[in-house]
Image (tube, rainbow, N blue to C red):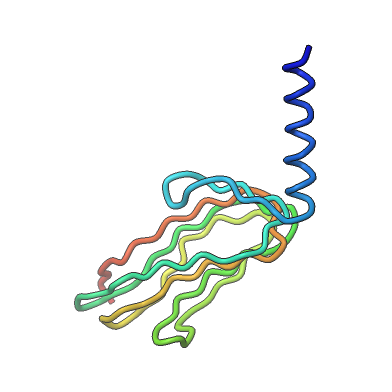
Amino acid sequence: MRTLLLLALLALGLYWYAERYGLAVGYPPFLPVFYWKYTGEAQYPIRVSGLYDAVKVKVSGNLEEGRLSVALLRDGRVVGERVYSGSFQEEARFFTSPGEYLLRFQLQGAKGRVRYDWVTTKFAP
């Protein structure tokens, strides 16, 4: 009985924290990430090289609230950006030239599940 009461108290505390401050559980790109009223961003530096280059980002998920913004930046300027909300599944391609880039995932009040993965690759024109 004590264990059940302790688990209920722990669940209530986790719910209170998620409602007040937001919560993200998961590890991209290998696992889906579950968000509860989460606002924040993650940045990943990537290097692109080759003849016909692109950054391919595969995004899928279901957000009950909020939105997800995926942006590719070079030297602080946005090269390409996509915004997602609701239910989505897309493979976004950002065509680039060789160099250093920053891939940014930005969430605003997100509540739901999102899975994303990215790769720099070469495509024929």
**Image side of residue 33 versus residue 14, left or right:** left
Q: Residue at x 39, y 65 (%)?
A: 56
- Name which residue lies at 46% across and 66% down: 92
Instruction: Give x and y (percent) for residue 49.
Output: 22, 75
| Position of residue 20 in the picture relative to residue 26 (left or right) | right
User: Can you give x and y, in whole percent of width and height, for residue 61 in the image?
Assistant: 59, 51
Of 83 and 29, nearer the camera is: 29
Report the residue at 74% width, 52% height from top.
64
Q: How many marks?
A: 0
Q: Where is residue 65 drawn, in percent x and y?
A: 75, 57
Quarter of the image with the C terminus in it:
bottom left
View extreme (front): residue: 2
59 over 10 or under it: above or below: below
**Compared with residue 46, is residue 88 higher up or lower down, i.e. above or below?**
above
Q: Quadrant of the N terminus?
A: top right
Q: Is residue 18 above or below residue 107?
A: above
The part of the image, by quadrant, that contains residue 14 is: top right
| Picture coordinates of residue 96, whole percent (x, y) | 34, 80
Q: Is residue 33 above or below residue 122?
A: above
Foreground of the two, 113 or 9:
9
**Residue beneath the point at 44% across and 80% down:** 73
User: Would you identify the image quadrant in which residue 121 lies?
Assistant: bottom left
Asked which quadrant contains residue 13, the reply is top right
103 relative to 68 in the view: left or right? left
Q: Residue furthest top?
A: 1
